[in-house]
């Protein structure tokens, strides 16, 4: 019964269903029972059982929010799937857009980013950084780069220091430690956007109240079984190399697992991103329910609604392509 409650609560959290899903009487439900009454298309059960990845529409949290949801089946247990993803770094391995990536150890140091290398074009862009929409930098960070006097050879070391400082501030203060982006005469608050994304997952309280509190209130009082990792990555976003800082963490109730991947700093192209995932135990293996909220200034203004609709379809298609690779790799 506890397992069914956990699974149902997590599914409600991830996809904001109008009613809780119905469950079979067995200790472990079937995928069909979990998906009953969901906001997915009526043929979702047949498609998921047949190995397809199915999309769902999610409400946006702001005029910048591109939101998408996916569900699919993997024929392995939630624990093994999580272990495979963690041990083999599967998401990074199958995503060809990842150029370089690494993890921060403990308090973190510059040596953790030894593998990070910037191209000449990137060095030039950062050496001449200014307030605006092209690069996501605070006023203090822009001042640091300007102090180099256009010396592009010093940019890489300075950007590593900037990334490390943002990691330290976030790890110590959570969302309150995220510096605003200088847009030139105004600023953008990435922390406020992430709080909206977290509020959209309010149903997580039914799964794990401590995990929900941790979303907004970290670093205090994390769940007892919390597993987390802090990563840096250099990623090709829309063809442009982008520097990203990510906080990933998971929590368990019974055999069900809830995870969050939060990009708390993105150097350009979009603002921030937060994804939630549920690994739900079903008779067939694991039902994976994934949601993604990405903040982008490119979908605001005139025609914003249409641009968001197009952007969400494109993003869902890209995510589906990525998870098809994950699904295939995890099944090996």
Image: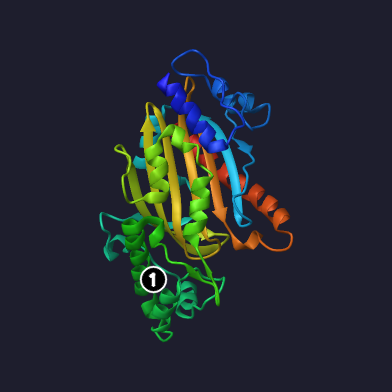
| Total numbered badges shown on the rendered structure | 1
Query: Which of the 4 quarters of the picture holds residue 260?
Result: top left
Query: Which of the 4 quarters of the picture holds residue 139?
Result: bottom left
Assign the N terminus to one quadrant of the image: top left
Q: Residue furthest top?
A: 25
Q: Is residue 89 visible?
A: no
Q: Nearer the viewer, residue 151 or 71?
A: 71
Which residue is at a point 37% across and 39% down the rendered structure image? Answer: 210
Relative to residue 291, is residue 117 depicted above or below? below
- Expressed as whole percent of the image width and height from the top left, the position of residue 238 reads 58, 60
Q: Nearer the viewer, residue 294 or 326?
A: 294
- Expressed as whole percent of the image width and height from the top left, the position of residue 221 reads 31, 45
Question: Could you classify mark 1 by the number of other residues whose Cα lies within 10 Å: few (under 14), some (14-19), or many (20 or more)?
Answer: many
- Expressed as whole percent of the image width and height from the top left, the position of residue 51 reads 57, 29
Q: Is residue 197 left or right of residue 118?
A: right
List the residue tagged with mark 1.
159
Q: Is residue 243 left or right of residue 32?
A: left
- Expressed as whole percent of the image width and height from the top left, the position of residue 181 reads 49, 69
Q: Is residue 229 visible?
A: yes
Q: Nearer the viewer, residue 249 or 159?
A: 249
Which residue is at a point 59% across and 50% down the rendered structure image? Answer: 61
Which residue is at a point 34% across and 45% down the rendered structure image? Answer: 228
């Amino acid at each position: 019964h506890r397992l069914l409650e956990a699974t149902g609560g997590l599914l409600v959290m991830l996809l904001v269903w109008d009613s809780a899903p119905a469950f079979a009487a067995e200790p472990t439900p079937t995928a069909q029972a979990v998906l009953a009454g969901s906001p997915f298309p009526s043929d979702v059960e047949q498609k998921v059982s047949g190995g397809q990845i199915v999309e769902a529409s999610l409400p946006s949290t702001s005029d910048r929010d591109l939101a998408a949801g996916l569900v699919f089946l993997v024929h392995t247990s939630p624990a093994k799937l999580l272990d495979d993803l963690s041990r083999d770094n599967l998401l990074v391995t199958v995503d060809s857009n990842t150029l370089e990536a690494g993890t921060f150890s403990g308090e973190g140091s510059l040596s953790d980013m030894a593998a990070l290398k910037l191209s000449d074009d990137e060095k030039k862009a950062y050496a001449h950084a200014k307030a605006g929409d092209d690069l996501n930098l605070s006023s203090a960070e822009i001042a640091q780069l300007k102090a180099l006097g256009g010396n592009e050879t010093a940019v890489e070391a300075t950007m590593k220091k900037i990334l490390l400082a943002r990691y330290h501030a976030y790890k110590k203060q959570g969302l309150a430690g995220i510096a605003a982006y200088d847009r030139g005469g105004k600023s953008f608050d990435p922390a406020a956007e992430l709080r909206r994304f977290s509020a959209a997952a309010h149903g997580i309280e039914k799964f794990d109240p401590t995990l929900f509190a941790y979303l907004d209130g970290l670093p205090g009082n994390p769940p007892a079984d919390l597993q987390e990792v802090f990563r840096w990555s250099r990623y090709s976003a829309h063809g442009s190399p982008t520097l990203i800082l990510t906080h990933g963490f998971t929590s368990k109730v019974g055999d069900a697992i809830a995870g969050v991947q939060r990009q708390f700093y993105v150097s350009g192209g979009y603002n921030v991103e937060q994804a939630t995932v549920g690994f739900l135990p079903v008779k067939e293996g694991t039902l994976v329910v994934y949601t993604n909220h990405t903040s982008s200034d490119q979908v605001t203004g005139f025609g914003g609604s249409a641009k968001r609709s197009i952007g969400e379809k494109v993003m869902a298609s890209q995510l589906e392509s990525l998870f098809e690779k994950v699904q295939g790799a995890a099944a090996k």
